[in-house]
Amino acid sequence: MNDLRRYKPLLPVFAIYVILLIIGATTPGLWQPIMFIMFYIGIGVALNNFLGLTGYVDFGYVAFLAMGAYGMAVALNYFTELGVGAIALGFFLALLFSALLCIAVGGVALRLRGAYFAIATIGVNEGLRYLIEGARIWGGSEGIVLSGKLRKAFGPEFANYLSTFVADVSLIIVIFMASIITVYLINSKVGYALLALREDEDAAKVMGINVTKYKLIAFFTSAAIGSLIGASAWTLKLTYVFPEDVFFIHYTVEAIVIVMLGGAGTLLGPVIGGLIYGALKYYLSVILPGFQLLAFAPLLVIIVVAFPDGIVGYIRKKLRETSLFEYIR
Amino acid sequence: MAFFEQLASNLIYGMLLGGVYGLATMGLSLIFGVLRVVNVGHGAFIMLGAFIAFWMFTLYLIPPIASIVMALVIGLALGYLIFISVMRRLLDAPELSTLLATFGIGIFIEELAKFFWGSGYVGYSWNIGRISVPITEIPLTKIYAFISSIIIATLLYVWFQRTKLGKAIRAVVEDREGAMVCGIDVNRIYALSFALGIGLTVLSGVLVTLFTPVGINVYMGGDYTLKAFVIAVLGGLGSPWGAFYAGFIFGLLENGSYTLLGLIPGVEPFGLTRFVSFAGLLIILLVKPTGLLGGE
Amino acid sequence: MALLKLEGVTKKFGGLVAVDHIDLEIDEGEAIGIVGPNGSGKTTLYNLISGVYLPDEGKIFFEGKDITMLPPYERTPLGLARTFQIPRPFGSASVRENVAIGAMFGRAKADVDEALNIADEYLKLVGIYDLKDKEAKLLTPLEKKLMELARALAMKPKLLLLDELMAGMNPNDINRIIELVKKIKDKENIAVVSMVEHLMHAITKFAERVIVMHQGKKLIEGPTMEVLNDPKVIEVYLGKKLKVKGE
């Protein structure tokens, strides 16, 4: 019975997902905005597994999304003859590339304390992008454009199907899975190790916790989910990958804002954060395109100074003594 | 011998630029040394300095060297403002908070700049001639920037060693509690150090444009943030002097890298150099996080 | 074979020798006191044993195994646990979760559910079971110390290092804690080392053997009453002529 009780917090999360999807599917013109919001929920959930659970910030986070995008692009571009299998290969490569980056950066940087780790990650994004552009890997700064190839290999109808239905459904599945992974992690021994190292890294070490190992686990989880999001929401959906898009630092900022706004380390937090941020961004972009960060950057500072627990963290505090507490994580 | 001439002139250039890089990073190291805060938004302040130089020259024909003073004053005021509104409240907060706060402030400054100045690239041209040295010709603007850096760094040194406030800051860096016991108002020192750190950073933004008077845009800071961190870690994160010397080393290495990588066909030397500096940062952090030039 | 053995362990910080060629042996189930004024190296010694610091010279053996260079998280599962002088709770977790973490990563290596049960056991033993769901950061200093103790015990140690556990407690609580520690120690065959700076009568009621440290060196070692009445100790430590009364 204990096992099932652990998954209670998924109820509000899945409820929100399902409601959003129903709204999107039944209301004309709302599917794209809903998928837009789902993307932001996704990157929030992904980053939360690291930022929220360890208290470490990875300023180069978007690089994992990029690795996922490239993974899928490489599969579809260079292995198109595999047909639908190329998509599966794409997801596999997405995970592989992000795992490699994870080990390269995490292997070095995660041994370091918080601030030094953050510094190490500052260059990941730009560094990797400049490597790809400078050494002309995977199309260099010209990126990879897939639409022509896809149409030839799959026929225009199926190609279109790929970049709409398949892309969207993949993203949705990834996000559902991501939340399940998060709640599993939080309730497991790994989750407790992360809680300890987040609260007091030195005390955690003395308690017998190999902090580097657990940081890596969280780092990889967050990287893997991010890469799958990049593969589905970017490459599959848009059918192109350009380094300046996929390495755009703003995504990292947005993911951080979403996690902190919703409540770092909670299950529901990034969902709420992504929902609010995604919706606001979508509608602000009609009025003031490109300026959402102008409002959200100071908001981040305010949250950090005055409301570090975020929305869900605050709600949890208030509900601590009640029976609803079990459902809000 | 053209290659060596090119290499030599690049190295001289690198050394001159290194002085400016060093000064630019001193602010970062000072803030970390005194407040234990990593100013992730560092680059945004350099961008501000660059724009101050641009606007003062373009609108009022004020030579950048004179803009230095204005930049310093604006930087000091801005730094103080940020300290009393945000940083002061985070002194006891976990590390993550200050990282995110400085990050958010940096982004905010960039976005605000974008709102007022747009996202285009601007530049100016201040041609005051060149001087000839044995191997090459160096534009006077760069000489001036270099000399300014040296002068400012020297003034700072004297200030830290001789004045009461300067010594108080050094005391706080060495032993916070001890300094408190000696009657030093630590909060005031924090405010001063933060303001000074930001002031130095904005000021060096002006000097940076003397080397690169074009390509000024609101997002230029990101590049400089990375460079600054490589230099700061190289010189030892809490040590302003380490940062200054490390700046020279970095300037040399960076320009050397441009030259060498430029020799490899099919490779884009500027981008690849940035990758190399990032990889270098990782290596230093792996091998000796306290910096190659001395301790914390 | 001794449970814990230190041979010539030395630790320097810059020019200062904090721990100076210490030899030490502790057997299973012993009750030891380490005593010494501020700066005598007691805390550094604890840090060396638990792995927070690595020694510059010397070796440390636990049950015959050389643990000198092992990181702290590899020492704990062998059977080593310590409390901190200023308790370090995992603030936003509940008391029960805090103690359970000890059970998860200590020698017991329990999984989550088992660990929570073990936590309950020790919370009851230490007497703070009614606080189990309270957020750890909301506890009073005394409650935090008790939680530290419960957490350390949940790690099922063979050797427990207590760091000024009883500092700041009133005499009733001190007696209660001493009885509690003795009881648990005997029941689970744990060697307990209690480090104090001032609370002499806590040591006399508890320790069979006392080690006195001074300026990084072992000044003297022996049965409690003998050591505490030794004139060298009295002079160096207590400063005046005092006779320490045993109980």
Image (tube, coloured by chain):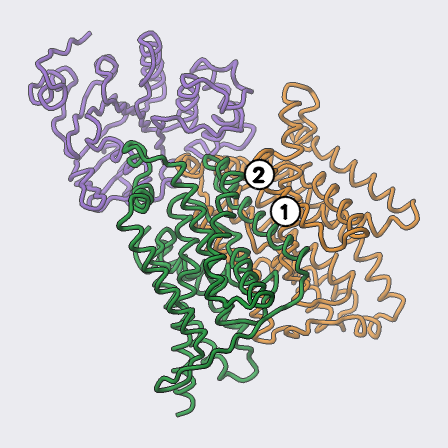
Picture quarter with the N terminus of chain A: top right
Q: Residue furthest bottom?
A: B1
| Whole-percent x, y for residue C108 in the image | 44, 31
Q: Secondary structure at mark 1?
A: helix
Q: In terms of sequence position, does the residue under pointer 2 or pointer 1 come before the other?
A: 1
Q: Position of residue B93 (x, y in %)?
A: 49, 36
Give the residue at x 43% y 64%. B21
Could you say which quadrant of the image residue A165 lies in? bottom right
User: Chain B colour?
Assistant: green
Give the amino acid type for the residue marked by disc 2 in the picture.
Val
Look at the image and give the colour of chain A: orange
Q: Quadrant of the C terminus of chain A?
A: top right
Q: Residues within 10 Å of mark 2 (few under 14, many from 20)?
A: many
In the displayed structure image, the side of residue C22 where residue A205 appears, left or right? right
Q: Is C152 or A304 nearer to us in this picture?
A: A304
Query: Farthest left residue?
Result: C231
Total marks shown come to 2
Relative image position of residue B118 (x, y in whole percent): 68, 61
Residue hosting label 1: A297
* Above or below, comparing residue A296 to residue B277 in the picture: above
- Kindly indicate whether the residues beneath marks 2 and 1 are on one polypeptide chain: yes
Q: Residues within 10 Å of mark 1 (few under 14, many from 20)?
A: many
- Vertical position of residue C240 compared to residue B167: above or below: above
Between B110 and C62, which is closer to the camera in this rendering?
A: B110
- Asked whether, in this view, residue A263 is left or right of residue A210, the answer is right
Element at badge 2?
A: helix
Give the image location of residue B236, x and y in percent.
36, 55
Read off the chain for label 1. A
- Chain C visual colour: purple
Mark 2 lies on residue: A304
Give the residue type that dot 1 points to: Ala
Chain ID at mark 2: A
